[in-house]
Amino acid sequence: MSVPFPETADVAAGFGADQVTIAPDGTAYVVPSGMHERLRRAVVADHEADDRVEHADHEAVDRAEHADRDPKVALVLAGWVCLQADGMTDRVNVDAPDAFVDGAPIRRFARAHDAGSVAVARHPSGDVVTSSAPSTFAFDGRVE
């Protein structure tokens, strides 16, 4: 797999970018706005053989049904995490796999953007986790 974007060698500087995408191995990449489709084409093909996913209620759903909507969703269904700050609000938005439970990159990204809130959309379940204390965000609700 060849990722067409720079790895964030300097984590502090990298997490200050408006768009950061984290690979399943934990490597973070700065992905310019509008370029997630390019990343999707480069990395998601490896996961296309597994074309079905299960919702939290164990209902099987075609991966393509979700992936066609948004390249970020396709990345998330392949195990990636997408973090975004739009600069217009003090909220950071995150798309993450249902199984992702590491709040550290979300807290780091929120601090880098002086965020006042965070919204995490989980896929494929569609659950949304929000917090008005993103610098201490944890998936189980406890403050870290």
Image (spheres, helix red, strand yellow):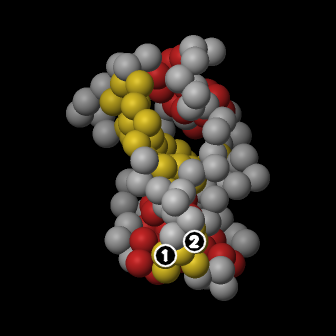
CB atoms of marks 1 and 2 within 8 Å:
yes
Q: Position of residue 25 (x, y in %)?
A: 76, 52
Q: Which residue is mark 2?
A: 53
Q: Identity of the amino acid at label 1?
A: Val
Place residue 54 in its image quadrant: bottom right
Place residue 139 in its image quadrant: top right
Q: Nearer the viewer, residue 126 or 47?
A: 126
Q: Identity of the amino acid at label 2?
A: Val
Query: In the picture provided, is 53 more to the left or to the right than 10?
Result: left
Above or below, 111 relative to 120: above
Q: Residue at x 38, y 67 (%)?
A: 70
Q: Residue at x 40, y 42 (%)?
A: 128
Give the structural element (helix, strand or loop) at label 1: strand
Image quarter hosting the C terminus: top right
Q: Position of residue 120 (x, y in %)?
A: 44, 40
Query: In the picture provided, is 109 more to the left or to the right than 91?
Result: right
Above or below, 88 relative to 51: above
Q: Nearer the viewer, residue 49 or 23?
A: 49
Q: Few, some or many C-alpha atoms within 10 Å of disc 2 (few <14, some 14-19, many ≥20)?
A: some
Residue reaching furthest to the bottom = 49
Query: In the picture provided, is 3 more to the left or to the right than 55?
Result: right
Q: Position of residue 124 (x, y in %)?
A: 49, 61
Q: Residue at x 66, y 85 (%)?
A: 49
Q: Which residue is mark 1?
A: 61
Q: CA distance from mark 1 to mark 2?
A: 6 Å
